[in-house]
Image (cartoon, coloured by chain):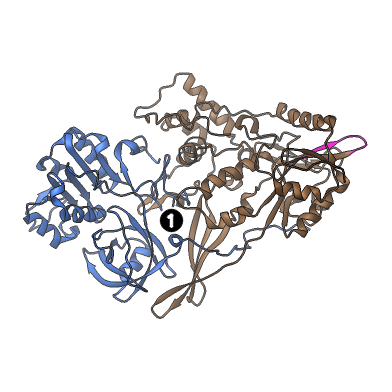
Chain colours: A blue, B brown
Amino acid sequence: MSTHAGEKEIQTSTRLPALMVPHRFYVQKVKRETRDTYTLELQPQNTPGELRFAPGQFNMLYVFGVGEVPISISGDPARPDLLLHTVRAVGAVTKAICRLKPGGVLGVRGPFGAHWPVEEAAGADVIIVAGGIGLAPLRPVVYHILSGRERYGRVALLYGARNPDEIMYRRELSHWTERPEIDTHITVDKAEAGWEGNVGVVTTLIPKAEFDPQATVAIVCGPEIMMRFTVIELKKRGVSEEKIYISMERNMQCGTGSCGHCQIGPYFVCKDGPVFRFDLIQPFFGKREI
Amino acid sequence: MTGFPAKIGSRAVLERRNLQKLFDVLSTQGYRIIGPTVRDGVIAYGELSSVDDLPAGWTDEQEGAFYRLKKGEGNALFHYGTGPDSLKRFLYPPLVRLWKARREDSGFRIVEENDEPPKYAFIGVHPCDLHAVAIQDKVLMTGEYADPFYALRRRKVFVVAVNCVKAGGTCFCVSMKTGPKATAGFDLALTEILEEERHYLVAEIGSEAGASVLREIPHKEASASEQAAAEEAVAEAARRMGRVLDITGIRDLLYENLEHPFWDEAAHRCLTCGNCTMVCPTCFCTTVEDVTDLSGEVAARLRRWDSCFTGEFTYIHGGSVRASARSRYRQWLVHKLAAWLDQFGTLGCVGCGRCITWCPVGIDITAVARALREKKAAGLPAPAGTPEKQGDRHEHACR
């Protein structure tokens, strides 16, 4: 008689490529950035190893028995021995990650995805625009540029947070603000008593940055609506779409372009992105429910 | 046995009464035999132990949202269209455990598992389903990240295709150039011929493995008239195919009309049940579930077929990207007939018609594509901001 290989018959695992299995990392340090956002410093549990990555790539972080989420890498690409992730506690998995203490163990798969054009930008002016936690995947860009500052023209970092309490990486930001290497401007959507800085959305900072629109690479990361208006402003200043890069966020489960969840038009955000050259993603960007 | 040289490309004739020998040879070689069989009121793929498990004398009637099993002419073994499932169920199982891990003092440890998947022989595979496997090969076995589960199962298969001599009620393989005759991807391809006094199968040899299996079965060289009978039976199926999907420029047609009001109309009946994605032989989307046992000591990651028609599919913090039925239907169709070309160099549709038959409200992919083309031709304005052409390199890539 015939049988039927149905749902009850769980087909078991088989020899898996390294990128399909979480690798154990120790939490070395946890730093609270804001009310709900933490930066974790991780090291491989077994051998002293390293995780080489390019600015803009992400890892899948797994908490035993809870689940897995994609989180961009926010550390220094020149320090592959020290893995940094900045995580906002919003869902079950991110909350579990943020509850980890030094000595805790996390599973890491990655790195995945396309990276920011830090090499292509050499010789040009660079304008980096960050909205909220979108600053996390841009910090590796800043580190990379600062480590070879002479290779770039003018460099500006424009960062918008919802309110002063939401500003992360405070020490580094004030350090960068004081130094000439990077023209740093910060704004908040909503000020509070004691705030003496800029108030308004991040696009209001664009006029403050000096750059040559014909020879500028723009690197933009934040909520989609913020990226949309930033691109509009940058284009008004004369930056062409081929010189603007954005980072997309979608439901990502595999990291390898196989689960299908992250698709936008022909692209798998996890594999072809998350960083996209704007002119390539433009036909699908900002279209409702695409 | 005759002096007929069983080699690739040559055609032999097997008498129906000797077909059991095919099962015997494959069993002896360690294959688990999967083929069409009557189950739950449909003809579906299942494990077969002998030729008697084939649906002798059965056929089907299919229409949009309609499937009926019925008695056919004589004792034909392969005179029916595709059932609800395909080889996908076996090569890319609906549920797999990606890995298992055990809690340890200092965290967790992945438990090694090295089970060998079964070695499958598929009998009675329609040409459209062979093309579906070829598409899944591209999706799951090429590029940077091959799927090890699929690759292990796929590598070992033996395929006995069956050329279609009866067009199904909902299929359109002629449009998609995927049938009704198998042209590649098989070890043996059979065409079943029922005559008044005789019941035989013309077998085309597609591989060395096919040739060596055939040598074990009583056969003789196919005569010119037997070959002609087989050709004519398949040609007749092609002529009777009821549906047409015009794929000329389909990619650009869809990309250029992503925001056309047409989509409201196309999707207004869609229940977002996901049936079309479950029965589709090429749909590959999955979701993962991280689970633990009751003690909390053992955790596992399960991978399950998923559907782009669910709300959770595009969930990111704050909500689903595709909240409406309209956007989910559009995603499915645009993926199948446009994005797939960019991603894998082929369309994602083989014309098997399953999505039409098993859609509970009978939405017909061929009718939807035609309606969009007609609306466009009628000069309804395409909205602004249409994508630029990215070249026509994939335009004719689906073969």
What residue type is disc 1 on?
Gln
Q: Residue under mark 1: which chain is it in?
A: A
Query: Please, is residue B267 above or below residue A96 in the view?
Result: above
Per the image, the residue denoted by label 1 is A253
> Which residue is pictured at 74% across the width and 52% down the height?
B39
Is B197 covered by the magenta stretch?
A: yes
Say whether residue B123 is visible. Answer: no
Residue sticking out furthest to the right? B197
Query: Please, is residue B244 above or below residue B162 in the view?
Result: above
Span colored in magenta? B190-198
Mark 1 falls on what kind of element? Answer: loop
Instruction: Give how far across and how far down residue A8 sits, in percent.
Output: 63, 62
Instruction: Give how far across and how far down residue A23 sits, in percent.
Output: 40, 67
Instruction: Give how far across and how far down residue A49 sits, in percent.
Output: 33, 68
> Which residue is pictured at 17% across the width and 44% down the height?
A126
The foreground one among A68 and A167 is A68
Is B168 covered by the magenta stretch?
A: no
Quadrant of image for the C terminus of chain B: top right
Instruction: Give how far across and how far down residue A125 sits, in percent.
Output: 15, 42
Query: Please, is residue B20 above or below residue B8 in the view?
Result: below
